[in-house]
Amino acid sequence: MADPADTPQSAPDNRPALALHVPEPKFRPGDTADFSDIDIGEPGAVERPDEAARPDDMKHLAYALVRVLGDDNQAHGPWDPKLDPDTLRKMLGHMAMVRAFDERMFRGQRQGKTSFYMKCTGEEATSVAASMALASDDMVFPSYRQQGILIARGYPLLEMINQIYSNKGDKLKGRQLPIMYSSREHSFFSISGNLATQTPQAVGWAMASAIKGDSRIAATWVGEGSTAEGDFHSACTFATVYNAPVILNVINNQWAISSFSGFAGAERTTFAARALGYGLAGLRVDGNDALACYAAQSWAANRARANQGPTLIEYFTYRAEGHSTSDDPSGYRSAQERDEWPLGDPVTRLKDHLIAIGEWDEDRQAAMDLKCAEEVKATTKEAEKNGILGHGLHHPFHTMFEDVFEKLPWHLEEQAEQATRERIAKFGTERPYG
Amino acid sequence: MSTDTKTDQVAETTPEAQERRINMIEAINEALDIMLARDPDVIVMGEDVGYFGGVFRCTAGLQAKHGKTRVFDTPISECGIIGVAVGMGAYGLRPVPEIQFADYIYPGLDQLISEAARLRYRSATEYIAPLTVRSPFGGGIFGGQTHSQSPESIFTHVSGLKTVIPSTPYDAKGLLIAAIEDNDPVIFFEPKRIYNGPFSGFYDKPVEPWKKHDQSVVPEGYYRIPLGKARKVREGEAVTVLAYGTMVHVAEAVCKAKEIDADILDLRTLMPLDIEAIEASVKKTGRCLIVHEATRTSGFGSELSALVTERCFYHLEAPVERVTGFDTPYPHSLEWAYFPGPVRIGDALDKILKD
């Protein structure tokens, strides 16, 4: 019997029967992945408009793909940020560290040291290179896959691991799911976990900076799937209405857990094209090309800093690993996709570029990778002295009730006393550790 | 600029000042004006609040006086209004967004519940959300189901939010100043039925203006009323009445008409709640009536009833009673059948006091 969905019912009148379109990704598990239909253009082929360009005069950039690094591993065209070798090596170093960190933390979760982790494999350039194009005191409102920003800004690995382990060294007091970092000192906003809520907040921060005549700008990161949230559209509206000095970075990594980008509208248009209806400047960039990521963010930052307005940037990339430690992508997508991705791997491409310009070699890369792995390993051991999740070395029970309000109200004080009584009844002592 | 010289003074007590009577809209406007002048980080924004001065006129004249970057209109996006306010708070501003009607607040709920309310906690005090969300609420103005709701218990249910509801011009001004200065996010619901005058609940009787009410005497200049302190409206022995907003006046009028010696508490702040005042009153009277306009099930009255029962059970001489709106949407033509008016309150009082 035919699937009823394939055979439109005859309508009760002469009008044609309507049919609902439910998006379907091109490849499912077991399929041969073939991305040859994706037009990735040529490196260096896309013009670089003036940073004060009117959004209407650069509409075509929302459908193009800004690329700098070519297959010859050289930088091409007007978007080449012409970074000096030291900066390029630093960028590569941060990306290598992010990768080493992700590997170790993923394994730590599998070993039962924490409940949850999220890798950003394949997307390192979208956070590391992009944030390097900002000033260190520009405020960032990240989503959950921008650990690269913290590493690029020099946030201590120990703090990150303490947070992931929710241990007694966690300055967020074990309150947040692993990887939901916060560091005011690094102008890094507290990660929510609710999707796209950070986008209007970034716009509000940027508006505040403009109200005060400050010179700092704001940038936010959001996944392509989360652009479907109303918050994102509110953010775009407020950004354009007040010409806010903000950069809206959309990381199009093709997958939102098991939902491909088509469920956020990618079958019809690009995510950069979202900018056009709002009158925002829109750029679409190869997210696996660290130089293009840097160049686009730098263009948008200069634009915002000169009161020329907000920019929406789509980073076209690929989520090479699962959504999180709780996800197994083999259940919904072709395992070949990662290898067939037409824009390669961002770390390899930057490394090959440095080698091609005579500023790096495979031995130095291997030594650097080893050094990163060793540093992460040593820091992990250090963090474990503060405990791992579920092993008692958490913050005292009373901290559960603190910071709900600035001052503890009577009802929370009563509940805190109850929690303490329960602890004493169970363990005979009030404090969990020394 | 005239307020500048007065902003540092506490409440005036001179006879001239005591004679100054204003309504609740003017009191709210004054509070905003004073805070805009005192604190350069205070920002007032919302739909129609700028040039026009707000649909209820609460922000009239503020943009002209304080400038377009301090007082401005926003897109019609409650999610965006609250969302940018959270970001402004993270920057260090003290935003006072207006949601034009409490009924419109729902698109902003995620930003209030998951963001503003949790920010201090989740960032372990690195970031705070010191916003005061002002919003007219409650019915009695033939606003139908989308301009009449009382959603306070949605917010009191959320850990990390404070909920404040004034019932007089004097309180509106002092509580709003305290809310703006507070470092926690505050939901400030303004009972729009009593913006221009207290309401007895006898809707077919002429409306009394605020100027005949002693609580319309409002000092010029800065003063604050601490959040979490209830106001004793009337001292009595027969029964405790717990109310807030419009219902304070309705309950008071009913008790007066029925010559009941009620001990009436205007809660003023639902979170944090003045539990000491409630306990002291109920232990004195042994009887308790709770009155609110919001729907009954899971309304704030449920919480009050539970607290009174838990804490004052052995002092009670009758079951705690709740008088509330019905569990229906706020109907347009049947507004006064829905409203918890004098008949419903009177019946409940009779029941509580019968033995």
Image (tube, rainbow, N blue to C red):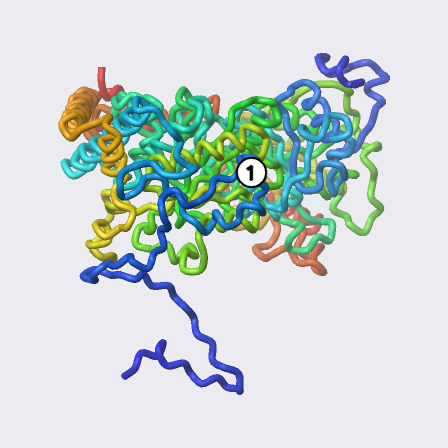
Q: Quadrant of the N terminus of chain A?
A: bottom left
Q: Residues within 10 Å of mark 1 (few under 14, many from 20)?
A: many
Residue A184: x and y in percent read 42, 23
Q: Quadrant of residue B22?
A: top right
Q: Is residue B228 above or below residue A56?
A: above
Amino acid residing under circle 1: Ile
**Residue A245 shows in the view:** yes
Q: Residue at x 29, y 58 (%)?
A: A36
| Chain of the residue displaying label 1 | B
Residue A125: x and y in percent read 32, 36
Q: Quadrant of the C terminus of chain A?
A: top left
| Total numbered labels placed on residues in the image | 1
**Tag 1 secondary structure:** helix
**Residue B105 shows in the view:** no
On screen, residue A84 versus residue B205, left or right, reads: left
Residue A145: x and y in percent read 33, 38
Q: Is residue B72 above or below residue A327?
A: above
Please name whichever residue, A336 or A15, is drawn nearer the observer in this view of the structure. Answer: A336
On screen, residue B334 versus residue A60, left or right, reads: right
Residue A107: x and y in percent read 16, 36
Q: Residue at x 79, y 25 (%)?
A: B217
Q: Quadrant of residue B137?
A: top right
Which residue is denoted by mark 1 in the rendering? B82
Q: Residue at x 26, y 50 (%)?
A: A341
Please name whichever residue, A303 or B33, is drawn nearer the observer in this view of the structure. Answer: A303
Please name whichever residue, A263 or B83, is drawn nearer the observer in this view of the structure. Answer: A263
On screen, residue B80 versus residue A73, left or right, reads: right
On screen, residue A195 versus residue B72, left or right, reads: left
Please name whichever residue, B225 or B124, is drawn nearer the observer in this view of the structure. Answer: B124
